[in-house]
Image: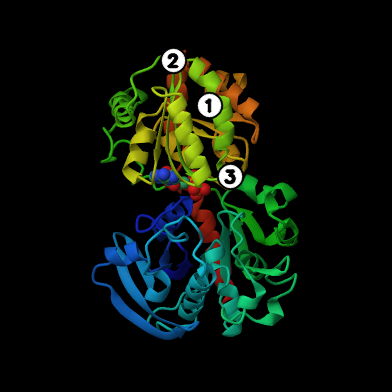
Amino acid sequence: MSRAVLAVASECAPVIKTGGLADVVGALPGALKLLGWHIRTLIPGYRPVMAQLEKAEVLAELPDLLGVSARILGARVGELELFVLDAPALYDRPGTPYLNEAGRDWPDNDLRFAALSLAGAAIAGGVLEMWIPELVHLHDWQAGFVPVYLRQLRLEVPTLFTVHNMSFLGLTRRERMLALGLPQSLFTIEGFEYWGQVSALKAGLTLATKLTTVSPTYARELMRPEFGMGLEGVMRLRAADLVGILNGIDTKVWNPRTDPAIVPFDHPAGKAPNRRALRAAFGLEPGPGPLAAVVSRLSDQKGLDLLIQALPVFLAQGGQLVLLGSGEKELENALLALAERHAGRVAVRIGFDEALAHLIYAGADAVLVPSRFEPCGLTQLYALRYGAVPVVARTGGLADTVIHANVAALATGCATGIVHNPGDAQALAEALLDLCALYSDRAVFTKLQQNGMAHPVGWEASAPRYAALYGELAALNG
Ligand code: ADP
């Protein structure tokens, strides 16, 4: 008999995805199932989610969920067992899960995700009758109020809060507390008060039974002011309850031997037809240097402004760059201008395109991740698996997953990529020169690629660690 866990999240791949959070939330149920845990995931019924549901079953009516009429639907999408919060007043809109069509946060995001959290607490409290979880696994600020509502409902259900990105604080004004059904008693330093505002992230951090984040290095970084977003003190206080568990990737979906979006391969040489297809897709001619790629949300975090500065030396060595991304308008424009300046050597596609992302990992010689901070990062893991050499900043999960090709690592044959100082355009430029030098030696470069392709990037190591935590938490249940 497997044991029941409710996951609460704002994204879950392949149903709805804007970034790595979705991949992880979508992969954990499969990984944990093998270890005896049955995860069902509660997500909002955004318009594209509702459009994908077949044979959804109404499991509960919530006529007044923070003033909104809602239902909890049960549905299966592939292997995933979902609870979908169907609340048209909150979720039946265009745009992304968080932004309107003009790229601005929905003004009622606080209510949209407070409602999700309250519905999660209600499920934990038995509103579905036929299914009661032993614990609740909360992902990021959108689920941060779950422990608050559990308290208010006088439910002692253990919770695990996973921080996928500390920079999203889930802030709202204190005047909104009444509308969100939040108690004044928790508007304190020990509760969810954050510089005079309310932070859903802080609620999760202070009130969840245990905490995880998505890499061991990020777990340490979060206790430092440069990364802690003002919550480093909270993290230090909770250090005994916090562990860093490295993300894995779904190696069934991301398998270069079977991926339907590419010409399958199991050796670096098999990347050639994909490289041709990738260049064709971006309108580039073959070049003498490496074909580097970026697949990314476009935000300050990702350090792409540094790449714009560092790129000329790389292009001068014959390198080319393809970039797929979407996000902040200013960065989009700067990157489009870069492509125009270096036509024929740099090509940029603005948008979100899952199939093209697969082709990029399969066709690129290198994948660049120059992030200023990176909780775990998944793109470098896809790159490893698809024989694209990752060039990454030494921060968070990037530091934990790539073995730098220094002389010692090359000599012992264990190098998988290039690691450089974060937040430093000069260091990135030097890393790109190293890439060109390694690329010019076929045998060395092929060995790097092979090492990467053989590097374990699935959930084998991390799923048992989540299972162990689930076991510990469930034992608190009595
Ligand atoms: P983050 O979660 O901060 O965005 P991660 O590296 O953890 O960064 O995860 C990013 C995920 O989103 C990867 O699966 C990546 O392939 C995907 N991704 C990012 N931008 C795009 C895009 N424009 N088109 C397709 N996939 C994208």
Q: Which quadrant holds residue 429?
A: top right
**In percent of the image, x 39 and y 29: which residue is there?**
364
**In percent of the image, x 55 and y 41: which residue is there?**
302
Quadrant occupied by the N terminus: bottom left
Q: Which mark is residue 301?
A: 3
Numbered disc 3: secondary structure: helix
Tell me the colour scheme of the image.
rainbow
Q: Mark 2 and mark 1 in contact (Cβ < 8 Å)? A: no
Closer to the N terminus: mark 2 or mark 3? Answer: 3
Q: CA distance from mark 1 to mark 3?
A: 29 Å
Q: Which mark is residue 43?
A: none
Numbered disc 2: secondary structure: helix
Q: Residue 436 location, x and y as percent?
A: 50, 18
Dot 2 crowding, Cα within 10 Å, few <14, some 14–19, many 20+:
few
As drawn, 1 above or below 21: below
Q: Which quadrant holds residue 309?
A: top right
Q: Which quadrant holds residue 401?
A: top right
Closer to the N terminus: mark 1 or mark 3? Answer: 3
Q: Residue 454 location, x and y as percent?
A: 43, 33
The reply to whether the residue tagged 3 has its Cβ within 8 angstroms of ligand 1 is yes
Q: CA distance from mark 1 to mark 2?
A: 14 Å
The reply to whether the residue tagged 2 has its Cβ within 8 angstroms of ligand 1 is no
Answer yes or no: is residue 404 visible: no
Q: Nearer the viewer, residue 57 or 169?
A: 169
Q: Nearer the viewer, residue 337 or 80?
A: 337
Q: CA distance from mark 2 to mark 3?
A: 34 Å
Residue ID for mark 1: 414
**In percent of the image, x 46 and y 59: which residue is there?**
99
Residue type at the position of mark 2: Ala
Closer to the N terminus: mark 1 or mark 2? Answer: 1
Residue ID for mark 2: 443
